[in-house]
Image: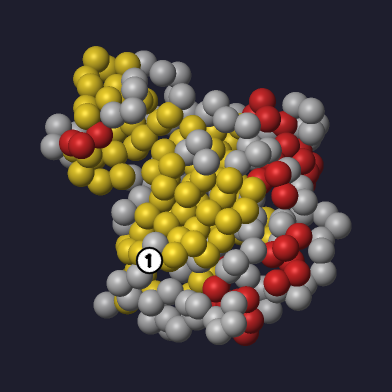
Amino acid sequence: MKFINFTSARFPNGTYGVFADDKKIEVIKGGLLDPIVKSGDVVDESEVISYLPPINPPNILAIGLNYVEHSKETDDRIPTSPLLFMKANSAVTGHKANIVLPHMAPGRVDYEAELCVIIGRKARNVSVEDALNYVFGYTCANDVSARDAQASDGQWVRAKSFDTFAPMGPYVVTDIDPTNLRVMSRLNGEVMQDGNTSDMLFPVATLVSYLSQGMTLLPGTAIFTGTPSGVGFARTPPVYLKPSDISEIEIEGIGILSNTVVSEQ
């Protein structure tokens, strides 16, 4: 199934819906993780005014260096276990919303295309074999990162937690295989990253199981699963986001997450 969180003229305060076909959205009652109860209202996607974040996660857990080629391009050692960091949930924004370059760190802001996993029910000490049964679905994410703050702080949380640094969307898809999905990023139409989740060091099931050994994964938790090679700071010369840029994240079977870059006022 494919879900959307949106506003329209009829639903100015936002509502969830599930796609009946490529364009028709059947409005549902309640939240993303609630049992599906259709309201009887149908909205065409052309009526959508804004795409809201697909989930307001209680936690955003993120995995660094989960693709070998990305580890190599950053001159980091290849991890032997998942490298965990966190992003503030206040960084979440949606499809077609702006990525805002923060006034205290505007000059070296980078993009990272990632598959995002949304946990559907409480998970604690789950096995690899059972892990995907705790996943509700998948969406596109951009792990936006202020590289200067990342380098100066000696850890990653602030650099990856500025407001708007966690775009997610536009849809949540439940019925896809997360082990073989093409993951791409484009900047102003130019392909910057082109990888596949089959190249992950630690696949989704391994990540869910591993993380659940150390903490309870609450329903709605978002897991950013790492980015392929091609990030901006590893290029020669480096490529960073600047005002008026359009950053796109495309994941096979899910869709395209698009955000325009602006400066903080």
Q: Name the foreground residue: 73 vs 49.
A: 73
Q: Amino acid at mark 1?
A: Asn
Whether residue 238 is visible here, answered yes or no, is yes
Q: Is residue 95 left or right of residue 91?
A: left
Q: Position of residue 161 (x, y in %)?
A: 51, 65
Position of 43 relative to 142 (above/below): above
Up-down: is 23 above or below 259? above
Residue 143 picture location, percent across and down: 53, 60
**Label 1, residues with CA under 10 Å away: few <14, some 14-19, many ≥20:** few
- Splitting the image into 4 quarters, where does residue 45 fall? top left
- Colour scheme: secondary structure
Residue at x-position 31% and y-position 54%: 96
Can residue 207 be seen in this snapshot? no
Q: Residue furthest front?
A: 190
Left/right placement of residue 74 relative to residue 12 reads right
Q: Secondary structure at mark 1?
A: loop
Q: Which residue is mark 1?
A: 188
Furthest toward the right, the residue is 80
- Image side of residue 228 versus residue 129, left or right: left
74 relative to 116, above or below: below
Q: Which residue is located at x 63 percent, y 32 percent? A: 177
Q: Quadrant of residue 73?
A: bottom right
- In the rendered image, the vertical position of residue 231 relative to residue 46, given as above or below: below
Instruction: Identify the residue shown where x is 56% and y is 50%.
Output: 183
Picture coordinates of residue 57, whole percent (x, y): 50, 45
* Label tally: 1
Q: Residue at x 38, y 66 (%)?
A: 188
What x and y, as percent, mark residue 14? Answer: 26, 38
Image quadrant for the C terminus? bottom left
